[in-house]
Image (cartoon, helix red, strand yellow):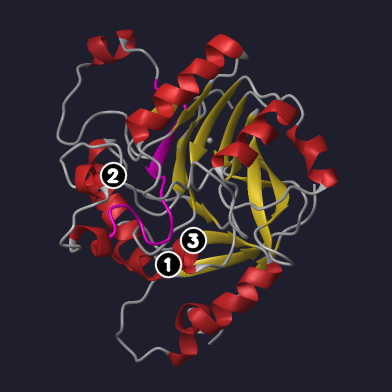
């Protein structure tokens, strides 16, 4: 039968604080620094990721970024753009995932154990391209072995796409009895503020190519826009007083029809005036060390605190 869909009215996370298998005495726990909310970058790359197979198999070996990206720990290794907010309150800790793309399983395999993550308390979808929803099927590991179900927050237009791309997750009546697919609770969000796990989420409508709407999101003074080619005038008001901006920057030289390039992204930073900016969604033309060295000079010349993010980056945040 079709899964009931919740329509949200208009209006940062989970896992225990101790490391897996650790034992903390009560006296030590009393003096421990309380866990703080944090933002974890699960992926910072394009839909195809970095490195590209085509570059690694090219006999000429002319792509230095992809060659470096295979080295263990190299920051040019990038999977599909995704962040996880570990939202800590006095009463609980919640894990809020933004997007679950094609490489989600590989991101989770590396970063969930590394950061002591287990449950997924919500997934918020930016848009319905494969690099944002291609990993929804992988959530079956959580709903079969960790928790009963996962709430998914999605815009109406993207839910309609999911009815085609993931029809068996939307309408479970088509599933063969005994098949253990993901158990998802779909919540339809409009372009109005809503609440997830006691956290107010403000959608940031943007264009991701001509006529294609995508959403960024604001959590407190953090603004996340991963897929954007243009920002509507009405969205700039929602970006006022942003302290941390996470913004799409595909390539170093120019924009594409669907993504900001670095020059346009920097123009937007100067316009929005956040305290700090981290770029995401980088392709293999963006060499992490080289581009960050260039960006560091903007602090000296313009006072701009701008850098590339990288997979596995974790920063403390206040929400």
Q: Residue 65's mark? A: 2
Quadrant showing the C terminus: top right
Q: Is residue 117 magenta?
A: no
* Residue at x-position 54% and y-position 14%: 299
User: Comparing marks 2 and 1, which lies closer to the viewer?
Assistant: 2
Q: Quarter-wise, where is residue 225 in the image?
A: top right
Q: Is residue 3 visible?
A: no
Q: Earlier in the sequence, mark 2 or mark 3?
A: 2
Q: Which residue is mark 3?
A: 132
Along the viewing direction, whichever of 86 and 99 lies nearer the viewer: 99
User: Comparing marks 1 and 3, which lies closer to the viewer?
Assistant: 3
Left or right, residue 303 beside residue 238:
left
Coordinates of residue 32 in the picture (x, y in percent): 31, 12
**For the residue carrying disc 1, how many other residues have a C-alpha within 10 Å: few (<14), some (14-19), or many (20+)?**
many
The vertical placement of 151 against 317, above or below, is below
Q: Is residue 279 visible?
A: yes
Q: Quarter-wise, where is residue 33 in the image?
A: top left
Q: Which residue is mark 1?
A: 136
* Residue at x-position 32% and y-position 42%: 117
Coordinates of residue 34 in the picture (x, y in percent): 40, 17
Coordinates of residue 314 in the picture (x, y in percent): 38, 30
Q: Which residues are magenta?
A: 35-52
Secondary structure under badge 3?
helix
Secondary structure under badge 2?
helix
| Contact (Cβ within 8 Å) of mark 2 with mark 1 | no
Q: Quarter-wise, where is residue 191 in the image?
A: bottom right
Left or right, residue 147 beside residue 303:
left
């Amino acid at each position: 039968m079709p899964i009931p869909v919740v329509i949200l009215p208009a209006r940062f996370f989970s896992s225990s604080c101790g490391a897996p298998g650790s034992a903390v005495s009560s006296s030590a726990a009393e003096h421990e620094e309380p866990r703080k909310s944090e933002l974890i970058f699960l992926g910072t790359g394009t839909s195809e990721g970095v490195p590209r197979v085509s570059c690694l198999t090219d006999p000429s070996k002319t792509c230095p970024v992809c060659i470096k990206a295979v080295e263990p720990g190299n920051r040019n290794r990038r999977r599909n753009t995704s962040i996880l907010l570990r939202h800590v309150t006095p009463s609980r800790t919640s894990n809020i995932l933004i997007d679950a793309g094609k490489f989600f399983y590989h991101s989770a395999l590396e970063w969930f154990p590394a950061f002591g993550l287990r449950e997924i308390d919500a997934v918020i979808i930016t848009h319905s391209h494969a690099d944002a929803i291609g990993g929804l099927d992988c959530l079956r590991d959580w709903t079969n072995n960790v928790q009963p179900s996962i709430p998914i927050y999605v815009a109406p237009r993207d839910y309609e796409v999911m009815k085609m791309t993931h029809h068996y997750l939307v309408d479970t009546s088509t599933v063969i009895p005994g098949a253990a697919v993901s158990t998802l609770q779909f919540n339809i969000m409009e372009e109005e503020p809503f609440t997830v796990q006691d956290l107010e989420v403000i959608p940031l409508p943007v264009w991701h190519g001509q006529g294609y709407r995508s959403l960024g999101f604001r959590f407190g003074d953090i603004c996340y826009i991963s897929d954007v080619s243009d920002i509507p005038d009405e969205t700039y008001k929602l970006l006022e007083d942003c302290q941390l901006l996470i913004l799409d920057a595909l390539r170093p030289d120019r924009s594409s029809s669907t993504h900001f390039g670095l020059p346009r992204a920097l123009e937007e930073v100067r316009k929005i005036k956040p305290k700090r900016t981290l770029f995401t969604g980088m392709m293999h033309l963006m060499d992490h060390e080289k581009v960050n060295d260039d960006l560091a000079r903007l602090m000296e010349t313009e006072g701009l605190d701008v850098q590339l993010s990288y997979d596995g980056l974790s920063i403390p945040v206040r929400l």
